[in-house]
Structures are given as C-alpha cells and as structure tokens.
Image (cartoon, rainbow, N blue to C red):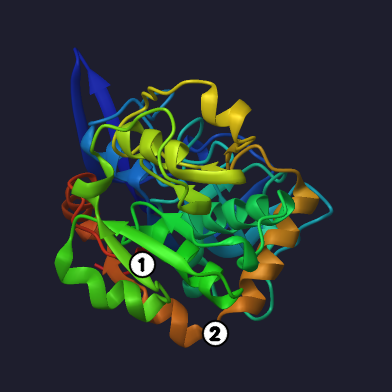
Amino acid sequence: MFRAIVVNKADGQHSATFENWQEDQLPNKAVLVKVAYSSLNFKDGLAVTGKGKILRDYPMIPGIDLAGTVIESKVSEFAAGDTVVLTGAGLGEDYCGGYAQKAQVDADALIKLPPTLSAHNAMAVGTAGFTAMLAVAALQKAEITPEQGPIIVTGAAGGVGSIAIAILAKLGYSVTAVTGREQLHQYLRDLGATNIISRAEMVRDARPLESQKWAGAVDNVGGPILTRIIAETMSNGSIASCGLAASHELHTTVMPFILRAIKLLGINSTLVTRQHRLHMWDQLSDLFDTAFWQSISETIGFSQIPEYAEKITNGEIRGRVVVDVNAE
C-alpha cells in the first residue's frame, strides 16, 4: 500500500483527494519505481485544481515528474536499484504520475540519473528545467550567439524562466527578464539577468514591425507579449516558444517572418528522442552545482501539494518547487 493524490471527476465535479492505493491499481507499465521526489509545474497546478484540461482519464494520479529508485523492471535497460528520472512523456496526464510513493512507468523516456545530480536536484530541474534547456539548445542550433544581441525571457520568475535565465547567463548571453513582480527583481539579477522590464510594457499593442531589440527569446506566456516579441526581434533572430501561461492565442502577421527572416521555434518537452533527452540532462548536470539548484527551489511535503497548486496557477511561485512524497 502507498499514498497518492488521486483526481476524480464525476458529474462535472472535480476532486483531488489523498488515498491509499495498491500496486495492482497502477497501470501495467515496464518499470516500477519507488518515488523519492516529484515537482510542481504549472501543468500540475492545473491538474490538481481542475483549472485546466490536463488529465486524459479518471481516476488519475497527477504529477508529470518523478525521481526515485527502480523496484523492478521488465526491460533490460533498467534494474532494481537504479536511480532514475522521468519528466513528462505522458506521466501524470495519460497515465498515473509522480504524486505517489510508487509509480509504474514507461521505459521510453525514463533515464538513469546523471551521477552529478541527486534525485532532489533532478526535481529542482524537472520538466521546467528540461524545457528551458531545450529552448536554449534550440536557439543555439538556430545560430543565435551571445555576440548577436540580448535574449528576452518571459515569465522570468517561474520555473522555466528562472532556469533559462541562469543557463543563458552561464553561456555568456545578455538576458532581459520580463516580470510583473517588482519584488523579485533582485532574484532575477542574481540568476544573471542584466536588464528587467515590466510585463505591462510588453503587453502594449504592437505593430507588425517594431524597433529591433532582441536577437532571440524564450517565451513562456504566449498572447500579446509574444506578439510584441515577434515584432521586436532582430533580423535572422529566433524565438523559442514553450508556454502559454497568459494565452494560447497569437495575433501577428507574416511580415516579421518574411521581411526579417525570424524563426518561431516550438518547444515540446515530450516530443524528444531518447538520445537528445540524455544529451540535455547531461548538459544540465554539468552547468550547475547543488547550491544553485537549492537556491532556486523550495521543498514541500506531500500534504502541501493542493495549497501550492493554487499558488502556481495564480502566478505566486518563484523558481521551482520540489515535492518530497515521503514527507508530510
């Protein structure tokens, strides 16, 4: 028997309750994992609170990330005792996820934890950090170099934004952070942001082409802010689009893409080959030490998940939240 948060929906009513489950209630997957830590992402907040259509079936254990130890495996790639990490790839959406003390998971996106990362630090990374690494790698592949000009990062104080700023700064880029929370300006500077502008400035209506300001961007919010970034991106610039916290809508024209040859790069942390997934995790493990991951995260107990799910959907979380599934 193990403890889990279980989401149900009946007669249009959403509920998230703490329950005790048996292993045979879990889906029949390749690897059984004893979960040590999970994390809290915006998508998890939507799933737990019922504010978004995240879950594909009910009852469902949410939690799109987990790190822990293999109990038993049906595939040769993993053996009992292996320390593993899994982010996204349907976990906590299509099948039962990381908000439980045990999980049965697919092997395709499961990887052995890089030796320089603890399970706790891996969940300080989580889907948010993995997405940030994918976004920066996409800009690099598009040949956006530090010499070309500043990179703008939206949703800067959230998980993806915080880690994207830190990665970019570590790689020598000049970073402009966009936030609506003035009290977090020093936090963003400590991460490596060289300039900070307000969210209010970025939501102003934009013409199809504005003055050229950004060599590239990591956008987590979509909507009118992304519209303005597109209009302000320099010729041959690139924008990594990886979130829609503000809006899924985008009102623009083809002019910036044709007249300035800019690129809009879609980032999906699920649609990643195993080889690329391993490469991204290796890069993340090499970039930062334990002190960094601790500085951008807080750890909560299992019973605090509903409270923090509300906070993250209300834009009240700074950085990353690690969930200790074995602590109250």
Which residue shows up at 75% across the image and 43% down it? 273
What amino acid type is highlighted by mark number 2? Asp
Which residue shows up at 62% across the image and 69% down it? 284
Between disc 1 and disc 2, whose residue precedes? Answer: 2
Q: Quadrant of residue 54?
A: top left
Q: Mark 1 points at which residue?
A: 326
| Residue 39 visible in image | yes
Would you say 45 lies left or right of 231 here? Answer: left
What amino acid type is highlighted by mark number 1? Asn
Vertical arrangement, residue 41 with respect to residue 133, above or below = above
Q: Distance between the residues labelled 1 and 2?
A: 24 Å
Would you say 256 lies left or right of 261 here? Answer: left
Would you say 76 lies left or right of 50 here? Answer: right
Q: From the top left corner, tell me how far across and down residue 274 is, in percent.
A: 76, 48
Q: Which quadrant is home to the C terminus?
A: bottom left
Q: From the top left corner, tell me how far across and down residue 134 is, in percent.
A: 61, 52
Vertical arrangement, residue 125 with respect to residue 49, above or below = below
Would you say 304 lies left or right of 260 here? Answer: left
Q: Mark 2 points at which residue?
A: 289
Vertical arrangement, residue 232 with respect to residue 111, above or below = above
Q: From the top left corner, tell me how far across and down residue 143 is, in percent.
A: 72, 54
Q: Quadrant of residue 249?
A: top left
Which residue shows up at 45% across the image and 66% down it? 175
Q: Is mark 1 on a helix, strand or loop?
A: loop
Vertical arrangement, residue 13 with respect to residue 133, above or below = above
